[in-house]
Amino acid sequence: MERAFVMFDDLKGKRVLVTGAGTGIGSGIALGFANAGAEIVVHYSSSAAGADKVVADIRQMGGRAVAIQANFSEVEPIRDLAREAIAFLGGIDAVVNNAGITMNRPFEKVTAEQFDVLYNVNVRAPFFLIQALLPELEKSRGTVINISSIHAFEGYTEHSVYAGTRGAIVAFTRQLAIELAPRGVRVNAIAPGAVPVPNHFKSRPGVDVEQAIKDCGKGIPCGFAGTPDDIANVALFLASEASRYIVGQTLVVDGGTTSWMPFGEQFKQPLTIQFGKGYVPGL
């Protein structure tokens, strides 16, 4: 696929940590920053092969990158990731909190363990990662970009836990931005709409991926589904001086999905696919 990254010259030489960058949106964001001349720490939890491929691609561009594994279900590995990233980069100019897991489950069937897993990875991890990186972000007058979702703004069947984590990121972003702006650190978020990535199709073996992506686009006002590059371009913008007057905002990047009124009865039907297998216990 031909990439279509927007160029921001002031990102050249910047030191960037992207979490969950071994696959999907995270890998697109890491490659986008590398294409702009930034040095990258590619964090991954379980997708080692994907992270290694991203690092190899960055090095092939002539860039500098390393892959670092960290399990976000506990706090100490998060702090270790911060220390290792700072050691490799020599500081930090931007962190993109992209790592996250999803799950669909009828509300009454959600277990305490499943609830904790999603909140630990999606909410607690970025909180304590930013905390660990803060001294260096203050030195560089850096930027924080949190990845939320349109699930923070609209309801969807069987997503009570996941949507709650994404709503928490929106509120956290707004609050933290006000607290850190006087200290020179800018905080914003991105709420992607439908961006089909390989993990989406693990629960649908045998599906025609190309056709599924086209079908997904039919329900989006712009007429097509988003790509990781679409999200990467917004992340580059938020990390650049071009967005210096944007503070505490969540930019919705969804092709118009949240702008239309979907009247129908689909919300009454249970989902027929299962997200979260391999990441969330009990599925």
Image (cartoon, grey):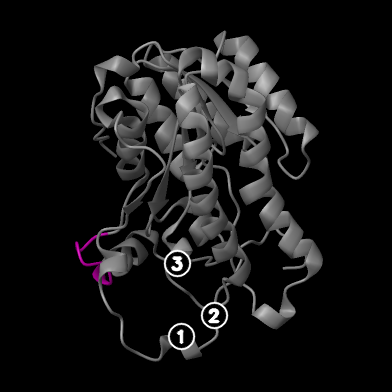
In the rendering, at what x and y percent does residue 178 appear? 48, 38
Which amino acid, mark 2? Thr
Disc number lying in front (2 or 1): 1
Label 1 CA crowd tier, 10 Å (few <14, some 14–19, many 20+): few
| Residue at image mark 3 | 207
In the rendering, at what x and y percent does residue 79 appear? 73, 27
| Residue at image mark 2 | 272
Farthest left residue in view: 222
Label 3 CA crowd tier, 10 Å (few <14, some 14–19, many 20+): few
Which amino acid, mark 3? Val
- Look at the image and say whether residue 9 sits in the magenta stretch: no
Mark closer to the chain start, 1 or 3: 3
The C terminus: image quadrant? bottom right
Disc number lying in front (1 or 3): 1
Label 2 CA crowd tier, 10 Å (few <14, some 14–19, many 20+): few
- Give the structural element (helix, strand or loop) at label 2: loop
Position of 80 with respect to 267 (left or right) is right
| Residue at image mark 1 | 267
Mark closer to the chain start, 2 or 1: 1
- Give the structural element (helix, strand or loop) at label 3: loop
Which amino acid, mark 1? Phe
Residue 236 or 36: which is nearer the viewer? 236
Mark closer to the chain start, 2 or 3: 3
Q: Quadrant of residue 44?
A: top right
Magenta highlight: main SS: loop
Position of 180 with respect to 69 (left or right) is left
